[in-house]
Amino acid sequence: MEELQDFITHRFNQLYIKSRPTFWVSLCFAGAILIALTLIIIIGLLPAYKETLLRELAINLLATVVGILATFLFVRLLFLWNHQDEDKNKVSYANSDMWRQYGTNYRQQFELHNSVFTVYCEPLLKKGEFKTLKVDDDPNNYFSLDTFIKAQFFTLIEAHTMSKSTNSVTVRLIDVIHQPGADNAFLRTARSTYLSHMLTNRALDYELKPGITIRSLFENTNHLVPLSRSRLSNHLGINALVFLKDTEKNSFLLLPERGNNATVAKHKVTASIATRLEMDKKHFPNTYIDKLTAPYIEEECIRVAIDKAIRVNNPPIDSIQFLGLSRDIYEGGKPTLFYVVYLNMTPDEYFQATKDYKTDNTHTGTDNKLPKSIIPLEEEKIDQVETIHVVKWATLKLVGGPKQIEPEPKYYDIAYDKAQLEFTEVFGLEGKSQELHKGFEQNLIANFWFLQNCS
Protein backbone atom coordinates (compact mmCIF):
# COMPACT_ATOMS: atom_id res chain seq x y z
CA MET A 1 0.00 0.00 0.00
CA GLU A 2 2.82 2.41 0.90
CA GLU A 3 4.62 1.72 -2.39
CA LEU A 4 1.40 2.37 -4.33
CA GLN A 5 0.85 5.64 -2.44
CA ASP A 6 4.42 6.77 -3.20
CA PHE A 7 3.97 5.93 -6.88
CA ILE A 8 0.66 7.79 -7.13
CA THR A 9 2.04 10.82 -5.31
CA HIS A 10 5.10 10.93 -7.55
CA ARG A 11 3.04 10.72 -10.74
CA PHE A 12 0.58 13.29 -9.44
CA ASN A 13 3.26 15.83 -8.57
CA GLN A 14 5.64 15.26 -11.46
CA LEU A 15 3.48 14.44 -14.47
CA TYR A 16 0.27 16.40 -13.90
CA ILE A 17 1.40 19.36 -11.85
CA LYS A 18 5.00 20.28 -12.59
CA SER A 19 5.39 19.33 -16.25
CA ARG A 20 2.19 20.86 -17.65
CA PRO A 21 3.19 24.57 -17.57
CA THR A 22 6.62 23.78 -19.10
CA PHE A 23 4.96 21.89 -21.97
CA TRP A 24 2.63 24.74 -22.92
CA VAL A 25 5.31 27.42 -22.58
CA SER A 26 7.70 25.40 -24.75
CA LEU A 27 5.04 24.81 -27.39
CA CYS A 28 4.14 28.50 -27.57
CA PHE A 29 7.83 29.46 -27.76
CA ALA A 30 8.49 26.98 -30.57
CA GLY A 31 5.47 28.25 -32.50
CA ALA A 32 6.63 31.85 -32.17
CA ILE A 33 10.10 30.97 -33.47
CA LEU A 34 8.61 29.02 -36.40
CA ILE A 35 6.37 31.83 -37.56
CA ALA A 36 9.16 34.39 -37.14
CA LEU A 37 11.54 32.37 -39.31
CA THR A 38 8.83 31.90 -41.93
CA LEU A 39 8.16 35.64 -42.10
CA ILE A 40 11.88 36.37 -42.41
CA ILE A 41 12.20 33.93 -45.31
CA ILE A 42 9.17 35.32 -47.11
CA ILE A 43 10.17 38.95 -46.62
CA GLY A 44 13.70 38.20 -47.84
CA LEU A 45 12.78 36.11 -50.88
CA LEU A 46 9.57 37.60 -52.27
CA PRO A 47 11.13 40.71 -53.91
CA ALA A 48 13.57 38.59 -55.94
CA TYR A 49 11.21 35.79 -56.97
CA LYS A 50 7.83 37.41 -57.49
CA GLU A 51 6.58 35.17 -60.30
CA THR A 52 8.48 31.98 -59.57
CA LEU A 53 7.76 28.65 -58.01
CA LEU A 54 9.68 29.79 -54.93
CA ARG A 55 7.11 32.52 -54.33
CA GLU A 56 4.30 29.96 -54.41
CA LEU A 57 6.31 27.73 -52.09
CA ALA A 58 6.76 30.58 -49.64
CA ILE A 59 3.05 31.38 -49.71
CA ASN A 60 2.16 27.73 -49.15
CA LEU A 61 4.67 27.57 -46.30
CA LEU A 62 3.12 30.63 -44.68
CA ALA A 63 -0.36 29.18 -45.10
CA THR A 64 0.78 25.91 -43.53
CA VAL A 65 2.34 27.63 -40.52
CA VAL A 66 -0.69 29.86 -40.03
CA GLY A 67 -2.94 26.80 -40.28
CA ILE A 68 -0.89 24.90 -37.70
CA LEU A 69 -0.91 27.85 -35.30
CA ALA A 70 -4.63 28.43 -35.84
CA THR A 71 -5.30 24.77 -35.10
CA PHE A 72 -3.14 24.94 -31.98
CA LEU A 73 -4.94 28.06 -30.79
CA PHE A 74 -8.32 26.47 -31.47
CA VAL A 75 -7.37 23.34 -29.52
CA ARG A 76 -6.01 25.47 -26.69
CA LEU A 77 -9.17 27.60 -26.57
CA LEU A 78 -11.29 24.45 -26.66
CA PHE A 79 -9.22 23.09 -23.77
CA LEU A 80 -9.78 26.25 -21.73
CA TRP A 81 -13.47 26.29 -22.62
CA ASN A 82 -13.92 22.71 -21.52
CA HIS A 83 -12.19 23.44 -18.23
CA GLN A 84 -13.72 26.83 -17.41
CA ASP A 85 -16.42 24.95 -15.54
CA GLU A 86 -14.01 22.52 -13.93
CA ASP A 87 -15.38 22.97 -10.42
CA LYS A 88 -18.96 22.11 -11.30
CA ASN A 89 -17.88 19.28 -13.63
CA LYS A 90 -16.01 17.48 -10.87
CA VAL A 91 -18.46 18.28 -8.04
CA SER A 92 -21.94 19.74 -8.40
CA TYR A 93 -22.43 22.64 -6.01
CA ALA A 94 -25.86 23.37 -7.49
CA ASN A 95 -28.79 23.28 -5.07
CA SER A 96 -31.03 22.19 -7.94
CA ASP A 97 -28.97 19.01 -8.32
CA MET A 98 -29.05 18.41 -4.58
CA TRP A 99 -32.82 18.87 -4.65
CA ARG A 100 -33.21 16.28 -7.38
CA GLN A 101 -31.26 13.65 -5.42
CA TYR A 102 -31.86 14.50 -1.76
CA GLY A 103 -35.11 16.49 -1.80
CA THR A 104 -35.57 18.26 1.53
CA ASN A 105 -33.21 15.83 3.28
CA TYR A 106 -30.29 17.87 4.64
CA ARG A 107 -31.68 21.13 3.24
CA GLN A 108 -31.24 24.09 5.58
CA GLN A 109 -33.09 27.33 4.84
CA PHE A 110 -32.70 30.41 7.01
CA GLU A 111 -33.02 34.19 6.92
CA LEU A 112 -30.09 36.56 7.30
CA HIS A 113 -30.28 40.32 6.71
CA ASN A 114 -33.72 39.94 5.11
CA SER A 115 -32.40 37.38 2.61
CA VAL A 116 -33.30 33.69 2.39
CA PHE A 117 -30.29 31.36 2.20
CA THR A 118 -30.31 27.68 1.26
CA VAL A 119 -27.55 25.17 1.89
CA TYR A 120 -27.35 21.38 1.97
CA CYS A 121 -25.53 20.07 5.02
CA GLU A 122 -26.07 17.57 7.85
CA PRO A 123 -25.30 19.08 11.27
CA LEU A 124 -23.80 16.33 13.44
CA LEU A 125 -22.81 18.38 16.49
CA LYS A 126 -23.92 21.82 17.61
CA LYS A 127 -22.60 24.03 20.37
CA GLY A 128 -24.73 23.66 23.50
CA GLU A 129 -25.85 20.10 22.73
CA PHE A 130 -23.00 18.56 24.74
CA LYS A 131 -20.60 19.52 27.52
CA THR A 132 -17.42 17.62 26.67
CA LEU A 133 -15.87 16.68 23.35
CA LYS A 134 -13.68 13.56 23.32
CA VAL A 135 -11.52 12.24 20.50
CA ASP A 136 -10.57 8.63 19.86
CA ASP A 137 -7.72 9.02 17.37
CA ASP A 138 -5.79 6.25 15.64
CA PRO A 139 -2.88 7.88 13.75
CA ASN A 140 -1.73 4.53 12.39
CA ASN A 141 -5.03 3.78 10.70
CA TYR A 142 -4.72 5.00 7.10
CA PHE A 143 -7.58 5.22 4.64
CA SER A 144 -7.26 2.86 1.66
CA LEU A 145 -8.77 3.81 -1.66
CA ASP A 146 -11.43 1.54 -3.10
CA THR A 147 -10.05 -0.80 -5.79
CA PHE A 148 -12.27 0.75 -8.46
CA ILE A 149 -11.10 4.27 -7.59
CA LYS A 150 -7.46 3.16 -7.75
CA ALA A 151 -8.08 1.79 -11.23
CA GLN A 152 -9.55 5.14 -12.29
CA PHE A 153 -6.68 7.20 -10.84
CA PHE A 154 -5.49 8.91 -14.03
CA THR A 155 -9.02 9.64 -15.21
CA LEU A 156 -10.01 11.19 -11.88
CA ILE A 157 -6.85 13.29 -11.71
CA GLU A 158 -7.85 14.81 -15.06
CA ALA A 159 -10.81 16.34 -13.24
CA HIS A 160 -8.34 18.75 -11.61
CA THR A 161 -6.40 19.85 -14.69
CA MET A 162 -6.81 23.58 -13.96
CA SER A 163 -6.20 23.26 -10.21
CA LYS A 164 -2.91 23.54 -8.39
CA SER A 165 -2.60 20.95 -5.68
CA THR A 166 -0.21 18.96 -3.54
CA ASN A 167 -0.33 15.96 -1.24
CA SER A 168 -0.25 15.87 2.55
CA VAL A 169 -1.48 13.88 5.51
CA THR A 170 -5.05 14.69 6.54
CA VAL A 171 -7.30 13.73 9.44
CA ARG A 172 -10.14 11.41 8.47
CA LEU A 173 -13.39 11.36 10.45
CA ILE A 174 -14.57 7.77 10.84
CA ASP A 175 -17.57 8.30 13.11
CA VAL A 176 -19.41 10.70 15.41
CA ILE A 177 -21.08 9.30 18.51
CA HIS A 178 -23.50 11.49 20.43
CA GLN A 179 -26.86 10.62 21.91
CA PRO A 180 -29.38 13.47 22.36
CA GLY A 181 -29.09 14.81 25.89
CA ALA A 182 -25.76 13.08 26.59
CA ASP A 183 -22.98 15.13 28.18
CA ASN A 184 -20.21 13.70 25.99
CA ALA A 185 -19.69 13.69 22.24
CA PHE A 186 -17.10 11.36 20.70
CA LEU A 187 -15.17 11.68 17.44
CA ARG A 188 -13.35 8.68 15.96
CA THR A 189 -10.54 9.80 13.69
CA ALA A 190 -7.79 8.27 11.60
CA ARG A 191 -5.61 9.46 8.71
CA SER A 192 -5.96 9.97 4.97
CA THR A 193 -4.20 12.06 2.34
CA TYR A 194 -5.17 15.15 0.40
CA LEU A 195 -4.69 13.20 -2.81
CA SER A 196 -7.30 10.67 -1.67
CA HIS A 197 -9.63 13.62 -1.10
CA MET A 198 -9.03 14.83 -4.66
CA LEU A 199 -9.84 11.37 -6.01
CA THR A 200 -13.04 10.87 -4.00
CA ASN A 201 -14.94 13.76 -2.35
CA ARG A 202 -13.59 16.38 -4.73
CA ALA A 203 -14.17 14.41 -7.93
CA LEU A 204 -17.54 13.06 -6.88
CA ASP A 205 -19.51 14.06 -9.99
CA TYR A 206 -16.78 13.77 -12.62
CA GLU A 207 -18.02 11.49 -15.38
CA LEU A 208 -15.82 8.45 -15.84
CA LYS A 209 -18.22 7.33 -18.58
CA PRO A 210 -21.55 8.94 -19.49
CA GLY A 211 -23.69 8.74 -16.37
CA ILE A 212 -20.99 6.99 -14.32
CA THR A 213 -19.58 8.98 -11.41
CA ILE A 214 -18.22 8.26 -7.93
CA ARG A 215 -21.48 9.65 -6.50
CA SER A 216 -23.62 7.40 -8.70
CA LEU A 217 -21.62 4.36 -7.60
CA PHE A 218 -21.02 5.01 -3.91
CA GLU A 219 -23.56 7.71 -2.89
CA ASN A 220 -26.54 6.97 -5.09
CA THR A 221 -29.54 7.32 -2.72
CA ASN A 222 -31.33 10.25 -1.10
CA HIS A 223 -29.42 9.67 2.15
CA LEU A 224 -25.68 9.77 2.77
CA VAL A 225 -23.78 6.61 3.54
CA PRO A 226 -22.82 6.78 7.26
CA LEU A 227 -19.26 7.93 7.91
CA SER A 228 -18.35 4.55 9.38
CA ARG A 229 -19.19 2.83 6.05
CA SER A 230 -18.23 5.54 3.59
CA ARG A 231 -15.65 4.72 0.92
CA LEU A 232 -14.68 8.38 0.47
CA SER A 233 -11.70 10.11 2.08
CA ASN A 234 -13.84 12.38 4.31
CA HIS A 235 -11.06 14.46 5.82
CA LEU A 236 -11.90 17.12 8.38
CA GLY A 237 -12.16 20.64 7.02
CA ILE A 238 -12.08 23.91 8.99
CA ASN A 239 -14.34 26.87 8.32
CA ALA A 240 -14.32 30.02 10.44
CA LEU A 241 -15.91 33.44 10.15
CA VAL A 242 -13.46 36.10 11.37
CA PHE A 243 -14.93 39.41 12.53
CA LEU A 244 -13.09 42.64 13.25
CA LYS A 245 -13.98 44.82 16.24
CA ASP A 246 -17.20 46.80 16.01
CA THR A 247 -16.64 50.46 15.17
CA GLU A 248 -19.57 52.84 15.51
CA LYS A 249 -21.95 49.87 15.74
CA ASN A 250 -20.60 48.38 12.51
CA SER A 251 -19.27 44.83 12.43
CA PHE A 252 -16.81 43.77 9.72
CA LEU A 253 -16.30 40.29 8.28
CA LEU A 254 -13.21 39.11 6.38
CA LEU A 255 -14.15 37.31 3.14
CA PRO A 256 -11.24 35.88 1.10
CA GLU A 257 -11.60 35.44 -2.66
CA ARG A 258 -9.71 32.54 -4.20
CA GLY A 259 -7.60 32.53 -7.35
CA ASN A 260 -8.18 30.72 -10.63
CA ASN A 261 -6.14 27.63 -9.73
CA ALA A 262 -7.87 26.77 -6.46
CA THR A 263 -9.11 23.20 -6.13
CA VAL A 264 -12.61 24.56 -5.49
CA ALA A 265 -14.43 27.93 -5.45
CA LYS A 266 -12.30 29.52 -8.18
CA HIS A 267 -12.83 33.32 -8.10
CA LYS A 268 -15.40 32.88 -5.34
CA VAL A 269 -15.50 34.09 -1.75
CA THR A 270 -15.10 31.62 1.10
CA ALA A 271 -15.21 31.70 4.86
CA SER A 272 -12.40 33.73 6.46
CA ILE A 273 -10.61 30.47 7.20
CA ALA A 274 -11.38 27.61 4.80
CA THR A 275 -8.83 24.83 4.88
CA ARG A 276 -8.23 21.28 6.03
CA LEU A 277 -7.45 20.37 9.63
CA GLU A 278 -3.68 20.66 9.68
CA MET A 279 -1.48 18.61 11.96
CA ASP A 280 0.89 21.50 12.49
CA LYS A 281 4.48 20.72 13.48
CA LYS A 282 4.26 23.27 16.27
CA HIS A 283 1.71 21.07 18.01
CA PHE A 284 2.49 17.69 16.47
CA PRO A 285 6.26 17.23 15.88
CA ASN A 286 5.60 13.95 14.08
CA THR A 287 2.26 14.05 12.32
CA TYR A 288 2.32 10.33 11.63
CA ILE A 289 2.35 9.21 15.29
CA ASP A 290 1.03 12.01 17.51
CA LYS A 291 -2.62 11.89 18.37
CA LEU A 292 -5.33 14.42 17.70
CA THR A 293 -6.83 16.03 20.80
CA ALA A 294 -10.15 17.68 21.62
CA PRO A 295 -8.56 21.02 22.69
CA TYR A 296 -6.83 21.18 19.30
CA ILE A 297 -10.15 20.73 17.52
CA GLU A 298 -12.05 23.15 19.75
CA GLU A 299 -9.62 26.05 19.51
CA GLU A 300 -5.92 25.48 18.79
CA CYS A 301 -6.37 24.52 15.13
CA ILE A 302 -7.76 28.01 14.50
CA ARG A 303 -4.70 29.60 16.08
CA VAL A 304 -2.54 27.50 13.76
CA ALA A 305 -4.48 28.53 10.64
CA ILE A 306 -5.39 32.15 11.29
CA ASP A 307 -2.11 34.00 10.58
CA LYS A 308 -1.76 32.58 7.07
CA ALA A 309 -5.48 32.83 6.34
CA ILE A 310 -5.99 36.53 7.10
CA ARG A 311 -2.43 37.80 6.43
CA VAL A 312 -1.73 39.15 9.92
CA ASN A 313 1.08 38.14 12.26
CA ASN A 314 -0.24 37.04 15.67
CA PRO A 315 -3.62 38.82 15.42
CA PRO A 316 -5.15 39.87 18.77
CA ILE A 317 -7.91 37.31 19.32
CA ASP A 318 -10.77 38.25 21.62
CA SER A 319 -12.48 34.87 21.39
CA ILE A 320 -12.74 31.64 19.40
CA GLN A 321 -16.08 29.83 19.50
CA PHE A 322 -16.50 26.28 18.27
CA LEU A 323 -19.95 26.22 16.64
CA GLY A 324 -20.30 22.63 15.51
CA LEU A 325 -19.60 19.88 13.03
CA SER A 326 -21.43 19.13 9.81
CA ARG A 327 -21.25 16.96 6.69
CA ASP A 328 -21.07 18.73 3.32
CA ILE A 329 -23.69 17.11 1.07
CA TYR A 330 -22.20 18.57 -2.11
CA GLU A 331 -18.94 16.68 -1.57
CA GLY A 332 -20.55 13.44 -0.49
CA GLY A 333 -20.59 14.02 3.25
CA LYS A 334 -17.11 15.47 3.79
CA PRO A 335 -17.08 16.70 7.42
CA THR A 336 -16.32 20.31 8.37
CA LEU A 337 -15.71 21.98 11.74
CA PHE A 338 -17.29 25.44 12.06
CA TYR A 339 -16.14 28.40 14.17
CA VAL A 340 -16.55 32.12 14.69
CA VAL A 341 -13.56 34.26 15.66
CA TYR A 342 -13.60 37.81 17.01
CA LEU A 343 -10.45 39.95 16.70
CA ASN A 344 -9.59 43.02 18.73
CA MET A 345 -8.77 45.02 15.60
CA THR A 346 -10.47 47.85 13.74
CA PRO A 347 -10.40 47.85 9.91
CA ASP A 348 -7.65 50.49 9.94
CA GLU A 349 -5.56 48.38 12.31
CA TYR A 350 -6.17 45.32 10.15
CA PHE A 351 -5.07 47.08 6.96
CA GLN A 352 -1.87 48.26 8.63
CA ALA A 353 -1.21 44.77 10.00
CA THR A 354 -1.50 43.25 6.52
CA LYS A 355 1.18 45.66 5.30
CA ASP A 356 3.45 44.63 8.16
CA TYR A 357 2.76 40.98 7.39
CA LYS A 358 3.73 41.37 3.75
CA THR A 359 6.93 43.15 4.74
CA ASP A 360 7.88 40.36 7.14
CA ASN A 361 7.14 37.44 4.80
CA THR A 362 8.33 36.32 1.39
CA HIS A 363 5.70 36.86 -1.30
CA THR A 364 5.15 36.63 -5.02
CA GLY A 365 3.95 39.31 -7.38
CA THR A 366 4.53 43.05 -7.53
CA ASP A 367 1.18 44.49 -6.53
CA ASN A 368 1.76 46.51 -3.37
CA LYS A 369 -1.70 48.03 -3.18
CA LEU A 370 -3.28 46.81 0.01
CA PRO A 371 -5.75 45.85 1.28
CA LYS A 372 -7.62 45.31 -1.98
CA SER A 373 -5.09 42.79 -3.25
CA ILE A 374 -3.28 40.76 -0.62
CA ILE A 375 -0.64 38.73 -2.35
CA PRO A 376 -0.34 34.94 -1.86
CA LEU A 377 2.83 33.68 -0.23
CA GLU A 378 5.26 31.50 -2.15
CA GLU A 379 4.94 28.59 0.26
CA GLU A 380 1.20 28.27 -0.27
CA LYS A 381 0.50 25.35 -2.58
CA ILE A 382 -3.27 25.04 -2.80
CA ASP A 383 -6.38 27.20 -2.75
CA GLN A 384 -4.50 30.48 -2.97
CA VAL A 385 -6.29 33.67 -2.00
CA GLU A 386 -6.12 36.63 -4.36
CA THR A 387 -8.03 39.18 -2.30
CA ILE A 388 -9.41 39.54 1.21
CA HIS A 389 -12.55 41.68 1.30
CA VAL A 390 -13.36 43.61 4.46
CA VAL A 391 -17.16 43.49 4.45
CA LYS A 392 -19.73 45.50 6.36
CA TRP A 393 -21.60 42.62 7.95
CA ALA A 394 -25.00 44.37 7.93
CA THR A 395 -24.84 44.87 4.15
CA LEU A 396 -24.32 41.21 3.29
CA LYS A 397 -27.28 39.59 1.55
CA LEU A 398 -28.13 37.09 -1.18
CA VAL A 399 -29.13 38.31 -4.64
CA GLY A 400 -30.99 36.02 -7.03
CA GLY A 401 -31.95 33.45 -4.43
CA PRO A 402 -35.35 32.46 -3.02
CA LYS A 403 -37.55 35.24 -1.67
CA GLN A 404 -39.12 33.18 1.10
CA ILE A 405 -38.55 29.94 2.95
CA GLU A 406 -40.34 27.09 1.15
CA PRO A 407 -40.82 23.93 3.26
CA GLU A 408 -41.26 21.73 0.19
CA PRO A 409 -41.34 23.49 -3.19
CA LYS A 410 -42.68 21.57 -6.17
CA TYR A 411 -39.61 22.46 -8.19
CA TYR A 412 -36.35 23.98 -7.10
CA ASP A 413 -35.76 26.97 -9.40
CA ILE A 414 -32.47 26.54 -11.22
CA ALA A 415 -31.98 30.31 -11.11
CA TYR A 416 -31.10 29.90 -7.43
CA ASP A 417 -27.90 28.21 -8.55
CA LYS A 418 -26.71 31.54 -9.94
CA ALA A 419 -27.35 33.50 -6.76
CA GLN A 420 -24.55 35.78 -5.56
CA LEU A 421 -23.58 37.51 -2.37
CA GLU A 422 -23.98 41.28 -2.34
CA PHE A 423 -21.97 43.28 0.15
CA THR A 424 -20.17 46.56 0.75
CA GLU A 425 -16.39 46.33 0.93
CA VAL A 426 -14.51 48.99 2.89
CA PHE A 427 -10.99 50.40 2.57
CA GLY A 428 -10.17 51.86 5.96
CA LEU A 429 -6.89 53.57 5.13
CA GLU A 430 -8.37 55.14 2.01
CA GLY A 431 -11.77 55.98 3.45
CA LYS A 432 -13.51 54.34 0.50
CA SER A 433 -16.09 51.61 -0.04
CA GLN A 434 -17.70 49.79 -2.94
CA GLU A 435 -20.59 47.40 -3.50
CA LEU A 436 -19.68 43.98 -4.90
CA HIS A 437 -21.47 40.88 -6.16
CA LYS A 438 -19.60 37.61 -5.81
CA GLY A 439 -20.15 33.89 -6.17
CA PHE A 440 -19.56 31.87 -3.02
CA GLU A 441 -18.49 28.50 -1.68
CA GLN A 442 -21.39 26.54 -0.21
CA ASN A 443 -19.57 25.91 3.08
CA LEU A 444 -19.60 29.68 3.65
CA ILE A 445 -23.40 29.54 3.72
CA ALA A 446 -23.22 26.57 6.09
CA ASN A 447 -21.03 28.68 8.36
CA PHE A 448 -23.68 31.42 8.32
CA TRP A 449 -26.24 28.80 9.33
CA PHE A 450 -24.11 27.67 12.27
CA LEU A 451 -23.57 31.29 13.31
CA GLN A 452 -27.35 31.82 13.29
CA ASN A 453 -28.20 28.64 15.17
CA CYS A 454 -25.27 27.85 17.45
CA SER A 455 -23.58 31.07 18.60
Image (cartoon, rainbow, N blue to C red):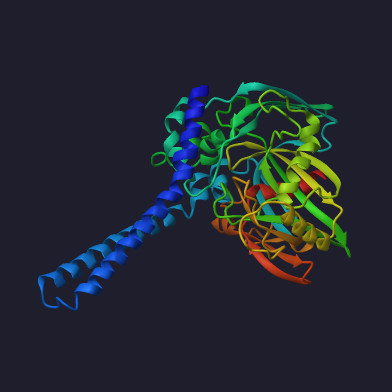
Locate residue 31, reporting x and y percent: 33, 59
Relative vertical location of residue 132 with respect to residue 405 in this rendering, above or below:
above
Residue lying at 65% horizontally and 41% vertically, measured from the top left = 106
Classify residue 238 as left or right of residue 164: right
Examine the rendering and report whether any part of residue 206 can be seen: no
Examine the rendering and report whether any part of residue 95 can be seen: yes
Classify residue 368 as left or right of residue 94: right
Between residue 346 and residue 53, name the one nearer to us.
Answer: 53
Relative vertical location of residue 52 with respect to residue 183 in this rendering, above or below:
below
Relative vertical location of residue 58 with respect to residue 243 in this rendering, above or below:
below
Locate residue 48, reporting x and y percent: 16, 77
Between residue 82 and residue 360, name the one nearer to us.
Answer: 360
For residue 402, what is the image quadrant?
bottom right
Numbered disc total = 0
Locate residue 213, reporting x and y percent: 46, 38
Classify residue 70 as left or right of residue 243: left
For residue 238, what is the image quadrant?
top right
Between residue 188 and residue 361, name the one nearer to us.
Answer: 361
